[in-house]
Amino acid sequence: MRIVVVGARGQLGAAVVHDLSTSPQRHDVVPLTRHEVDVTDDRAVARAIELARPDAIVNCTAYNQVDAAEDHPVEALTHNAFAVRALARAAERGGAALVHFGSDFVFDGMTTTPYTEDARPNPLSAYGASKMLGEWFALDAPRGYVLRVESLFGRAPDGPPPKGSVAGLVKGLLAGSSPPVFVDRTVTPTYVIDGARATRLLLESSAVPGLYHCVNSNACTWQEFGYEAARLLGVEAKLTPVKVADVTLRARRPQFCALSNDKLRRAGIEMPTWQDALARYVRSVVVPRPPAPSGPSGATRGSPNVGDSRA
């Protein structure tokens, strides 16, 4: 299969390129960086896709500055929505499938159970609104797939250095500092290696086009995540607990934003647990010390930095 990956040098894009290129099928991958195609230029997008003549397009580009989007909503919409519309139109003209990555930020977080794909979006921020519109444009493509990811972490073997909340958390724990972590924000993070694999499997399968949640299994608070990271690193879990209400951020965040990946499972794609994903990530970036004891009462506790890793 000939597959164009747009945003091929980003955190998720590099993982997608690596997985597609090294899979048993050895797909013909056409990686396009922002220097090779300006996704905000409809004509440039059309030309690039027409020249590549792909069977599928995977869009890994995004404007992910959540707080800055409040002051620059047009820029967020240009990258997260209208660029997706251009790719969807190019995919339709060329008869290609389109995979686009959505976000948990399309929800308001006013629930206590993981969101399913049928849940009604209600974004709290300009960023969330731009991602919601981008999902709609992607699903307009005859063979459009939207994979909602959340709190991306990790890196491909040949990808850029790890970034985001989890990378900052691990760095802080190894340095012996006390990274701030949310104790009352529930998430379902996505390890980019697992997200890339799910993307490939979806394209290789006969799965019905549409919306899927592509997150690691099991929900956790960031506090639970942080304590587990410390245990795997073999360091003291020196974390600074923070509540959502105590932090002033330019853009509102959904407090409960766990996503259910049951639909993806029914399509035959099983996502590993976040614990398994975190263990593999830790092994990929450090040589861990012997695991430390679990958190209080024998439970693994954890929490990420106050920042976000968005798609």
Image (cartoon, rainbow, N blue to C red):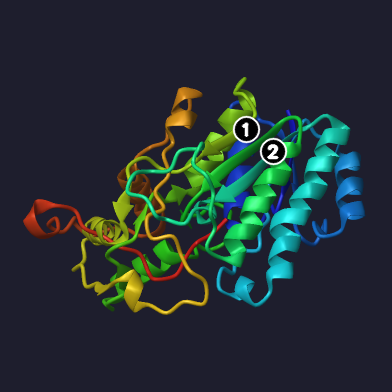
Q: Residue at x 42, y 35 (%)?
A: 271
Q: Amino acid at mark 2?
A: Leu
Expressed as whole percent of the image width and height from the top left, the position of residue 124 reads: 52, 63
Expressed as whole percent of the image width and height from the top left, the position of residue 144 reads: 70, 35
Q: Quadrant of residue 304?
A: bottom left
Q: Amino acid at mark 1?
A: Gly
Q: Residue at x 21, y 66 (%)?
A: 235
Determine whether 232 is above or below 208 in the image: below
Q: Nearer the viewer, residue 148 or 163?
A: 148
Badge 2: residue crowd in 10 Å (few <14, some 14–19, many ≥20)? many
Across the whole image, how many numbered discs are drawn on residues?
2
The mark found on residue 139 in the picture is 2
Q: For the residues marked 2 and 1, what is the alpha-carbon distance in whole angstroms?
A: 6 Å
Q: Residue furthest left?
A: 297
- Cβ atoms at labels 2 and 1 below 8 Å apart: yes
Q: Say left or right for 93 vs 26.
A: right
Determine whether 131 is above or below 50 in the image: below
Q: Say left or right for 184 vs 30.
A: left
Q: Quadrant of the C terminus?
A: bottom right
Q: Is residue 58 visible?
A: no
Closer to the chain start, of discs 2 and 1, is 2
Expressed as whole percent of the image width and height from the top left, the position of residue 88 reads: 78, 42
- Element at label 2: helix
Q: Residue at x 39, y 48 (%)?
A: 258
Expressed as whole percent of the image width and height from the top left, the position of residue 25 reads: 63, 26
The mark found on residue 210 in the picture is 1
The mark found on residue 135 in the picture is none
Q: Nearer the viewer, residue 154 or 98?
A: 98
- Element at label 1: strand
